[in-house]
Image: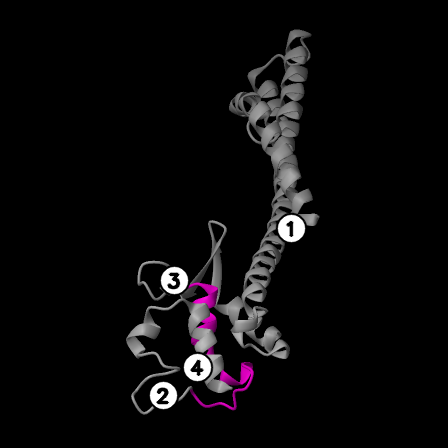
């Protein structure tokens, strides 16, 4: 529900930006980034112009001094506003980063848990928190998809062309952390005398899906 609300707000905001963008761009060309400072500056210059028109300011020195005082007041106000805006923007960026991290974790939780709870995964239920912790450190979310990475390098799956899937990672995890799996006392799956595992050669197993590999590994453990 929170995610749907966030998306609806983003859509509404995008529509508002599309409507007001051209108008704001034109105003920015004239007034700059700080409309309050521009308004104060304009009012101040109008006041000076009126004083000149009324004869209150007659010499160039008087006019220049009046303009300088007005510019200094506007500049001081602008700097105070700019500082407040920078601090507010920093706080918003921190909130956005936190929310993005939560969304990423939510997606990793969902996809990894979906694979782990499959009967043929062989993962012990109590090992799920540790498996998820490993997944957080390995998977990134890019274009809405989980991509395993070692630093900035993508870790590819069995076909050598696509990123390693969660299912393939679970198969690999059996060797890295065998204690996470049922019926496993830490050793690897043993092959038969003919070099086969579960009646299949290594070449045949290499061509199987991650689910098929897990099924064979679990059968060997039993």
Residue that numbered label 1 is attached to: 91
Image position of 113 with respect to 42: above or below: below
The percent coordinates of residue 208 (x first, y second) are 37, 68
The percent coordinates of residue 180 (x first, y second) are 55, 81
Marking on residue 115: none
How far apart are labels 1 and 4 at the CA level?
Answer: 44 Å
Q: Which residues are magenta?
A: 163-188
Residue that numbered label 4 is attached to: 175
Marking on residue 152: 3
Task: Work out whether residue 9 or residue 179 is closer to the camera in this orientation and state it.
Answer: 179
Give the secondary structure at mark 4. Answer: helix
- Disc 1 + disc 4, Cβ < 8 Å: no
Q: Tag 1: Cα neighbours inside 10 Å, few (<14), some, or many (≥20)?
A: few
The percent coordinates of residue 104 (x first, y second) are 56, 57
How far apart are labels 3 and 2 at the CA level?
Answer: 36 Å
Q: Picture quarter containing residue 153?
A: bottom left
């Amino acid at each position: 529900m929170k995610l749907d609300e966030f998306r609806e707000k983003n859509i509404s905001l995008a529509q508002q930006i599309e409507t007001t963008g051209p108008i704001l761009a034109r105003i920015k060309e004239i007034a700059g980034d700080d409309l309050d400072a521009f308004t104060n500056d304009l009012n101040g210059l109008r006041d000076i112009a009126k004083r000149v028109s009324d004869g209150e300011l007659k010499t160039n020195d008087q006019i220049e001094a009046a303009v300088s005082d007005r510019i200094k007041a506007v500049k001081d106000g602008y700097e105070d506003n700019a500082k407040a805006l920078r601090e507010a923007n920093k706080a918003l960026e921190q909130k956005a980063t936190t929310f993005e991290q939560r969304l990423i974790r939510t997606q990793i939780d969902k996809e990894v848990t979906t694979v782990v709870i499959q009967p043929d995964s062989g993962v012990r239920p109590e090992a799920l928190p540790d498996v998820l912790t490993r997944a957080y450190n390995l998977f990134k979310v890019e274009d809405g998809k989980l991509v395993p990475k070692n630093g900035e390098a993508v870790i590819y799956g069995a076909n050598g062309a696509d990123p390693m899937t969660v299912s393939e990672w679970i198969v690999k995890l059996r060797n890295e952390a065998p204690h996470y799996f049922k019926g496993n006392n830490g050793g690897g799956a043993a092959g038969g005398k003919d070099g086969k595992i579960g009646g299949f050669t290594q070449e045949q197993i290499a061509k199987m899906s991650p689910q098929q590999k897990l099924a064979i590994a679990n059968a060997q453990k039993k």
